[in-house]
Image (spheres, grey):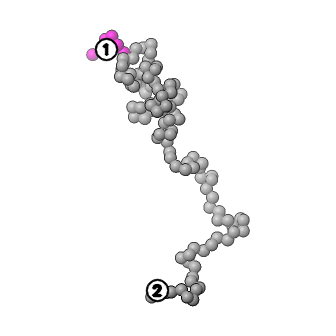
Amino acid sequence: MPNWGGGNKCGACQGTVYHAEEVQCDGKSFHKCCFLCMVCRKGLDSNNVAIHDTEIYCKSCYGKKYGPKGYGYGQGAGTLNMDRGERLGIKPEETQCHRPTTNPNSSKFA
């Protein structure tokens, strides 16, 4: 059935969007004043928009909310180091479980 006397529904406020005030994103229509980030409420443009389900975000807020988490993420494997100090003259210590007990007063369980 044709939509007489109106336009599409806004993806944010569900009001009628007329052609003069329409912004389209991901096949949905928005009022220019409703095309805002869900978190920081800044106005969006086609270069700064990220969509998650039915919500729209600026790329910064999207990254904070749905991006990877954790200390030091994004530094890559280049910062990993398997050196145990041999270059500096440090000898790696043996672990306690492999070191034989040399104390004669230590008790032994039989």
For residue 100, which quarter of the picture? bottom right
Q: Is residue 84 above or below residue 60?
A: below
For residue 91, which quarter of the picture? bottom right
Q: Which residue is mark 1?
A: 3
Main SS category, magenta section:
loop
**Disc assigned to residue 78:** none
Residue 102 at x, y percent in the picture: 59, 85
Residue 18 at x, y percent in the picture: 40, 14
Residue 47 at x, y percent in the picture: 53, 28
Sequence-first tag of 1 and 2: 1
In front: mark 1 or mark 2?
2
| Residue positioned 63% across, 58% down in the render | 81
| Residue positioned 60% across, 74% down in the render | 94
Question: Relative to residue 23, is residue 84 drawn left or right?
Answer: right
Q: Is residue 92 above or below residue 109?
A: above
Region rendered in magenta: 1-7
Image quarter hosting the C terminus: bottom left
Q: Which residue is mark 2?
A: 109
